[in-house]
Amino acid sequence: MNTKSSRSLLVGGNATNTGINQQWEQDNQAWWDWYVTLADNPDQTDGALLEVPTLPVGSVPDDQAIADELSTPYDLSSDDLIFFRDNGYVKLKLVLSAGAVLRLRQELVRLLSEEFETVLDQRNANRFLSMEMMWLNNALVRKYVLSPRIAKIAADLLDVARIRLYHDNILSKEPGCGRTPWHYDDHHFPLASHDVVTAWIPAQPIPAAMGPLAFAKPICAYKLVEHIAFSKFDTSYDRKVSEVFRDKDITVDATPFQIGEVSFHHNLSFHTAAANRTTQSRIVLANTYFADGARVLDQPTMVSGDWQKFLPGVEPGGVASSELNPVCWPPESDVDD
Ligand SMILES: O=C(O)CCC(=O)C(=O)O
Ligand SMILES: [Fe+2]
């Protein structure tokens, strides 16, 4: 199955004069292939990739156990809430059991290898693979995307009562693939709201050498780089953002992810990821949620040319609540209207 979509060239910075107002004409995979070329890779080396321990292939939880786990609320502490408010992201341990991570990985490996006709976990594959909207056709992926456990965390972090899905994204940074450029997600989504958060769910542990998602803190770091013009031709935007953050002593949290650890980032959080210098594919499910009631921008010209794929039937300025944006929290049965 192919999940073609087009998307915006926008990745932060001032869109107006930099030629990034135009729409992306190719598919989503081509977007990622292009996008990773905008990352500065000063330390790029053709040296050996690090061997990481092979993941166990033994028994994994059955469908019912997965469904139960993904419906059980997660206890957020007040420290977690404060951390997210101040820094625009939070990393939470044990959101998933090791079994639920391994089950997810098995399914994502299967989907990616079918779609791209490739073998995952191969040395020097060097690509960034991406598939969207898989929740529509895959019952297991749907459990992880519409998970009340995950969506309640998103709602609580944003401090809103009801949360809807924008879309899912399966991402595989293949062995040898370079950095993800610095950006924030605000302009990727045509939503007139800052109540937008992405759950980045690794499907294996992510040691430093595999390129964990890394966040600039505090959240207002984005204000330091708003003046930098985005360049769609070279790595200058990414390089300049790195320079400003270094000069202004912005802390970058690039810590590894343990198995079952999940990060949540706000759409104003600046983030990047290092290269994958291991022999294992860095596979992730990234689900974006937004507050119920959010509207589409009046003039969604700077966003995905294909945004209606995620919000079919919704007009500019309209409420973002198509059938492809289900309420994920609270669960349907608890909703009385
Ligand atoms: O996985 C990555 O390297 C980037 C993902 C990302 O930017 C996101 O999920 O917002
Ligand atoms: Fe992002």
Image (cartoon, rainbow, N blue to C red):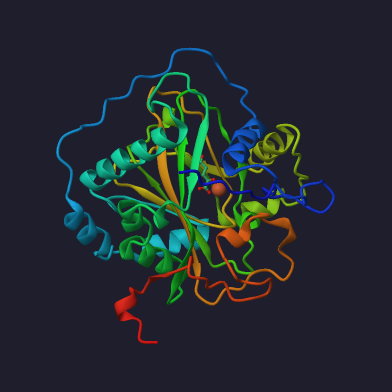
Where is residue 146, by image quadrant? bottom left
x, y (%) of residue 211? 46, 33
Where is residue 304, by image quadrant? bottom right
The residue positioned 50% from the left and 43% from the top of the image is 2
Give the left or right position of residue 89, taking residue 67 as reference. Answer: right
Q: Is residue 258 above or below residue 209?
A: below
x, y (%) of residue 46? 53, 13
The residue positioned 37% from the left and 50% from the top of the image is 262
Q: Is residue 319 above or below residue 92?
A: below
x, y (%) of residue 22? 77, 50
x, y (%) of residue 210? 42, 30
Q: Quadrant of the N terminus?
A: top left
User: Which sits in the foreground, 47 or 81?
Assistant: 47
Farthest left residue in view: 59
Give the left or right position of residue 43, taking residue 94 as reference. Answer: right
The residue positioned 63% from the left and 37% from the top of the image is 35
Q: Is residue 165 above or below residue 228?
A: below
Farthest front residue in view: 1
Give the left or right position of residue 13, taking residue 308 as reference. Answer: right
Q: Quadrant of the C terminus?
A: bottom left
Whether residue 75 is visible here, answered yes or no, is: yes
